[in-house]
Amino acid sequence: MKGFRSVIFAAGTAWFLSVLSCGTTGVREVRESPPAPAAPAPESTLAFAMRVQDTLDAGTVKDAISLFDTVDPETASAAGVRLMLASLLLSDNQLSQAEEIAAGLITDNPGDTDALVLAALIAKAAGKGVQKRQYIARALELDPSNPGANVELGDEQMLRRNYGRAARYYAKALEGDPKSPAALFGLGKSSYYLGNLKAAEGAFRTMTVLCPGESAPWAYLAKLETEKNDHKKAQSYLEKALGIDPGSYDALLDYGQNQRAQGNLPQAASAWERAVKVDPNYFLAYEYLAGVYDDMGQFDRSLKNYRMVARTNPEYFYAYESIGVSAWKTGNWKECRQALMKAREYNPGTISYPLLIFAAYCREGNRAEARNYLAQVMRNMDRSTLEYALARLYFDNINESSVVQKIMGESSVNTRGKLLYYMGLYYDINGAPDMARNFYLQVNEIIAPMFVEYRLNEWALGRS
């Protein structure tokens, strides 16, 4: 999930620290004669590992890497310390240096499964898929239940959405290490997607005990409660997740959804505003904000956020439609038609965009440009269709009764309602408000409408 602290990285850190704890502590000989101060004892690998962990907690990966320049040569040469340095270099994307250290560890000890798994992760980061698979295979030959190797294979299957196979790999990893956070998290996620909610809950609850500093398991427990429609309990779990990691983008998204489900729209908006500050370059929080501000009647804020959806996710054509609709509400006709023109690039088959663009031009006072635009659209339309007849009516104001008759004969309620709206709009932009209202009222009578024009129709009735 985007925005969560990487559980896998956290697990990797714990794994490497556990490896380091196996290191030995040596003491240099002290000369007895002549008397002299004792030389400082080399730092134990475990003590150094804890110093690195403290630096990671307080600073950055680069800060932690810089500590390796200060460690004594004996400690620096320990396999566990070299393994940790390579893992940090991997985290900092210094792949060639990390690869060199991992290769040296494997040369020194070909049976070192920790080094093999690390080498696989480095190869993966470098885009060397064949090498990665070779290292994983060697690790599994030596240890079929190796947690790191099985978690990596499980993660591969998760990316392919093969959740059943992924769950089997995570379960195998737990045979090797029942307390592996990465394996528990993977098993929880894969079980969740498989609909095995009991297994998912068990894995995530175990994680909350083993990894009290992780927000992710609490956030997933909240998802499980949401599945049960227990929004209050889900809220409590999300608050625990955010208490641990206030900057979790995904937990903030879910908290907003949770508040919205309980009817707390301002609280939902507040959560999503926080998410935007965490990651201003991802579109989803903007989309949620646009929707909730729309529901709250704050159309300027809604429009602002739809603009950000389009900016951060330009291929999401619904954002342009939403900008167009929101700009329609606020009377920003130029932005309305520009956004709908962009939406039409992605969805050219609908008649809605051209007719709304025509109307926006008219409301700007530019009917000539409206006709020029619609003429270009009509060239590529099937002249036998009702949509063409409606577009022709907008273009030259001919055959009104014939078009209405065809619309009333449309069998689909939603299509009929949508086209009746455009009849109302036609009269609206041509200065016949009473005729327009007649059609708007017919649209308003439709039960369970499934077309965007119904919203525009409500606004038109509110104005008329």
Image: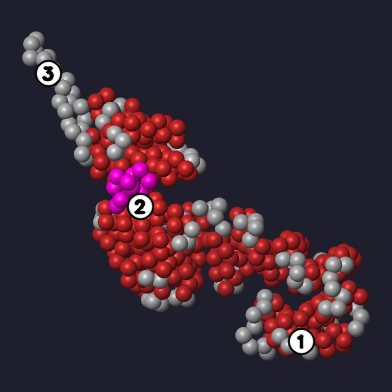
Tell me if I can see residue 1 in this picture.
no
- Tell me the element at label 3: loop
Magenta-drawn segment: 137-150
Amino acid type for the residue under numbered disc 3: Val
Give the residue type that dot 2 points to: Asn
Which residue occupies 26% across, 53% down? 177
Q: Residue 413 occupies which quadrant of the picture? A: bottom right
Mark 2 burial class by Cα count in 10 Å: few <14, some 14-19, many 20+: many
Q: Which secondary structure type mostly characterizes the magenta part of the structure?
A: helix
Q: Which residue is mark 3?
A: 30
What residue is rendered at 29% in x and 34% in y?
A: 109
Q: Earlier in the sequence, mark 2 or mark 3?
A: 3
Sequence-wise first label, 3 or 1: 3
Q: Residue 393 at x, y = what percent? A: 87, 78
237 vs 416, nearest the viewer: 416
SS at mark 2? helix
Residue 28: percent from the left, percent from the top?
A: 16, 22
Quadrant for the N terminus, please. bottom left
Would you say 216 lies left or right of 454 here? left
Q: Residue furthest front?
A: 141
Residues at circles 3 and 1 in contact by the CB criterion of under 8 Å: no
User: Which amino acid type is marked by label 1?
Assistant: Glu
Residue sitting nearer the eye, 464 or 156: 156
Pointer 2 with pointer 1, Cβ within 8 A: no
Question: Is 373 on the left-hand or right-hand side of 184?
Answer: right
For residue 410, the mark is 1
Circle 2/circle 3 CB separation < 8 Å: no
Look at discs 2 and 3 and give the one toward the viewer: 2
Which residue is painted at 43% across and 45% down in the image?
133
Which numbered dot is residue 206?
none
- Residue beneath the point at 31% across and 57% down: 172
Q: Which mark is residue 150?
A: 2
